[in-house]
Image: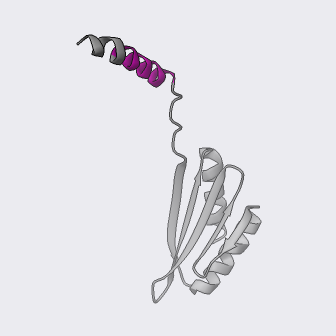
Amino acid sequence: MKFFSTVFAPMTLGLGLVALAAPAQAEAPGLFYSWRSLDTSVTQCVTQAETAMVTVALDNINVEPTSVAGRTEDSTALIVCLDNGADTTVMVIVSGDDEEEAIEIREALKRAF
């Protein structure tokens, strides 16, 4: 028992103090989305999505066959175009630490459709 009290007790106290001094974990960024059906093709939807990203002044725009992504300093936006046969579903997804900015970007991208 003497070994435990002289070796483990100070170590346990030290670990407890480190845990108390650890910084609080950051909150996850907000995620905001919207979707709707369009009477258009996936190709036209992707073209419209790219134009919307440029209009909203997003950077690092990346165009894929069914999606377009872009970002600001604090937010990332993604527009996905899904073929439903008769129409196309467009999904607008924005994530960011600044909730107000992310919602503004989502709304601006939605207006482009």
Q: Give how far across and how far down residue 72 sits, in percent.
A: 71, 55
Residue at the far front: name it.
3
Per the image, is 10 magenta?
A: yes
**Residue closest to the eye, 44 or 17:** 17
Q: Give how far across and how far down residue 58 sits, in percent.
A: 73, 61
| Quarter of the N terminus within the rendering | top left
Residue 44 higher or lower than 15, as above or below: below
Per the image, is 61 magenta?
A: no
Residue at the far left: name it.
1
Left or right side of 23 for 6: left
Left or right side of 94 for 2: left
Q: Give how far across and how far down residue 56 sits, in percent.
A: 73, 62
- Identify the residue at image location x=67%, y=77%: 48
Residue 21 higher or lower than 41, as above or below: above
Give the prevailing secondary structure in the magenta stretch. Answer: helix
Left or right side of 89 for 107: right
**Residue closest to the eye, 59 or 37:** 59
- Identify the residue at image location x=68%, y=64%: 70
| Quarter of the C terminus within the rendering | bottom right
Q: Quadrant of residue 81?
A: bottom right
Q: Give how far across and how far down residue 88 sits, in percent.
A: 51, 81
Task: Tell me which segment is drawn in magenta.
Answer: 9-21
The coloring applied to the image is one colour
- Identify the residue at image location x=29%, y=14%: 3
Numbered circles on residues, count: 0
Residue 21 higher or lower than 110, as above or below: above
- Identify the residue at image location x=55%, y=73%: 80
